[in-house]
Amino acid sequence: MKEKAKILDQEGISRAIMRIAHEIIEKNKGSAGLCVVGIRNRGVYIAQRISACIKQIEGKDVSTGALDITLYRDDLALATGQPLVRKTEIDFDINDKNLVLVDDVLYTGRTIRAALDALIDFGRPKSIQLAVLVDRGHRELPIRADFVGKNIPTSKKESVEVHLQESDGSDEVLIAEKE
Amino acid sequence: MSWTKKDLLGLEYLTPEEIELILDTAESFKEVSTREIKKVPALRGKTAVNLFYEPSTRTRVSFEVAAKRLSADVINIATETSSVRKGETLIDTGKNIQALKADIIIMRHNCSGAANMLARCLDISVVNAGDGWHEHPTQALLDIFTLKEKLGKIKGLNVAIVGDIAHSRVARSNIWGLTKLGAKVTLCAPAILLPPGIEITGVKTSSNIDEVLKNADAINVLRMQFERDEDAAFPEQLDYFKKFGITEERLAKAKKDIIVMHPGPINRGIEMSSGVADGKNSVILEQVTNGIAVRMAVLFLVSQAREAKQ
């Protein structure tokens, strides 16, 4: 991997997440009946940050959970290297909630497809909305995000790397070229 | 760390890291059984065959529930009503099941080593659900999973295995698993039920249950397998209960938070009193619940490893 450009730095990520939080509140007319679920791994950290921002704005806690989609992947049989099954932690009722699903990068849309299937097994939310830090295009399924931190047009040869304090020790979004 | 074995035959053949991987994966799977819809599509389109040459209810049902929660199709073969009665060999039965394009055989057999032999002859996965006096790996895994869940770790724990060690595959699998993960294991039984030379596996032996209970963080009480009592080597039942049975009085002298396990089915009043079986230290029913998560993890991992090889 050869690093090409830094797309977002720490402040850029914070601003994007704060803006997404405002947009979520605007669209849902407040935070009542709202819950946030992040897709493992990095989606969970972004979800927690979005929830913290919503709390800061609205003054109320928002239920926040974590979803592991490994068992719902459509490439489970093809996966090279073994996918690790991690914990799903949704310890609140999602029925009739407006649920915001959060991931770091939106690419083919297949992860989101898997996440939607998984969520439906937990109940019937009133709505599911999608928030991503980066939308890099190249969708293979009819899926779009409701809230986007940054749109980054990429080629398929490039990879988008999201680094977060919680998992990687720093906050930044990079584009790298596969060698 | 990734899993590369198409079969699970025994804990003797696993590294500590592989055992930890199963336990970690099981921890993730445990949550599935708490959902409103207790099912994930991970093994959709896969077929698991329960091939049981010995009677079993809890292990067979637990495997069936585990496979179904992963969306696999499950077929149960009870050998009393199958071609085995007509003299078909184990390998022929296995090859026929493979020809049906099944993906996993879950086998219980009365001969030690039966699962190992079948696994060598087949390309599909074989999961040992108990072979003779050899191993019962998923039972030991669920015991260890339960211990870890309750006490937070395995390394350094004093675990006593009490009862019919000689005839017990559960004991052997537990010895392998626990010692590999760094627990100190003591076997406690009448001398006649302790296999000679078992100390080479790194365990201590004793025939004094009260001594053993003083130090134990957990005890795994085995079922007295009277159906295996071919050479009348077994002590008389009441006598056994008096000398080795786990009672409330005995437990009162043990560590306050000692964990009491039993692989089931319990002979109440022989291995332990009802008060102990249903008491606050008992985790016997939690073991049953955890068995599903552990078996889901095993079925998932062997299935993934086989896919990766193809």
Image (tube, rainbow, N blue to C red):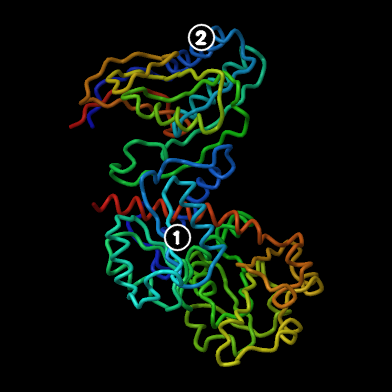
Task: Determine whether the residue tagged by mark 1 lies in a helix, strand or loop.
Answer: strand
From the viewer's perspective, is residue B105 above or below residue A6? below
Residue at 48% x, 23% y: name it: A101
Task: Determine whether the residue tagged by mark 2 lies in a helix, strand or loop.
Answer: helix
Is label 2 on the same chain as label 1? no
Direction from residue B129 to residue B286 in the image, left or right? right
Direction from residue A178 to residue B77 in the image, left or right? right
Residue A164 at what x, y percent from top left? Answer: 43, 28
From the viewer's perspective, is residue B297 above or below residue A167? below
Chain to which mark 2 belongs:
A
Mark 2 → mark 1, Cα distance in angstroms: 54 Å
Residue at 48% x, 78% y: name it: B133
Q: State the residue in front, B28 or B217.
A: B28
> Residue B134 occupies which quadrant of the picture?
bottom left
On the image, numbered disc 1 is attached to which residue? B76
Residue B84 at what x, y percent from top left? Answer: 38, 73
| Residue A76, disc | none
| Residue A23, disc | 2
Direction from residue A83 to residue B293 in the image, left or right? right
In the image, what residue type sits under mark 1? Asn
> Residue B274 occupies which quadrant of the picture?
bottom right
Q: State the residue in front, A97 or A39.
A: A97
**Of discs 2 and 1, which sits in the foreground?**
1
Q: State the residue in front, B41 or B179.
A: B41
From the viewer's perspective, is residue A175 above or below residue B94? above
Residue B91 at what x, y percent from top left? Answer: 30, 72
Direction from residue B19 to residue A177 in the image, left or right? left
Chain to which mark 1 belongs:
B
Q: State the residue in front, B254 or B11.
A: B11
